Image (cartoon, grey):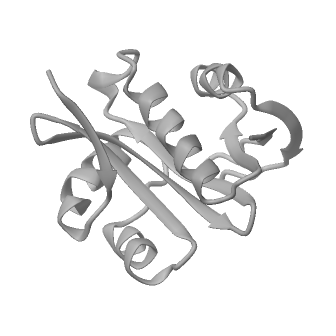
Amino acid sequence: MSVNIRPMVIEDLDRVEVIEEASFATPWSKEVYKKEISDNKFAHYYVIESNKEILGFIGAWMIFDEVQVTNFAVLPSKRKMGYGKMLFQYLINKALLQGGRIMSLEVRETNTPAQTLYESFGLKKAGIRKRYYTDNNEDAIVMWVEL
């Protein structure tokens, strides 16, 4: 089975929306992604696919030497198969090539599988954003790493 990671394009958004809705309590809309990939010069979004099926995606804003991961999801049926690790490593590699030196993100306090993944890449817990998630007022853990 071959796996490919490439930039997200408008034609991917129907499938991205399916993954988004299966992954998040307050999913982003296709319109948000369209604006991000069409209009935001700081935004970098990538999809991972196998046999032309999109299995997941990751996005970040790269501003000067800072990389802020904005969204990251893998189809629930494809989790724990290494696709998330491949995507995250790909983003780190892209960030380094573009001069990225610091990476940060927010993750739900209860999302321990994601935290474990991020820690495997060296991200450390650096703070809390109280009631960050509007669907249930859950706190977000801020994680970051020097690349």
Q: What residue occupies the far left of the structure in this picture? A: 51
Left or right? Give the position of 130 relative to 78: right
Q: What residue occupies the far right of the structure in this picture? A: 127
Q: Residue at coordinates 64% horizontally, 46% vertically from top-left?
A: 136
Quadrant (top left/top right/bottom left/bottom right) for the C terminus: top right
Q: Residue at coordinates 52% horizontally, 79% vertically from top-left?
A: 41
- Residue 83 at x, y percent in the picture: 37, 27
Q: Would you place residue 51 above or below residue 43 in this image?
A: above
Closest to the observer: 87 or 127? 87
Left or right? Give the position of 98 relative to 119: left
Q: Quadrant of residue 33?
A: bottom left
- Residue 5 at x, y percent in the picture: 31, 43
Quadrant (top left/top right/bottom left/bottom right) for the N terminus: top left
Left or right? Give the position of 25 relative to 134: left
Q: What residue occupies the far top of the structure in this picture? A: 80
Q: Would you place residue 69 above or below residue 126 in this image?
A: below
Q: What residue occupies the far bottom of the structure in this picture? A: 39
Q: Would you place residue 49 above or below residue 132 in this image?
A: above
Q: Residue at coordinates 11% horizontally, 42% vertically from top-left?
A: 52
Q: Is residue 146 visible?
A: yes
- Residue 86 at x, y percent in the picture: 43, 29
Q: Residue at coordinates 29% horizontally, 23% vertically from top-left?
A: 78
Closest to the observer: 121 or 56? 121
Q: Is residue 134 visible?
A: no
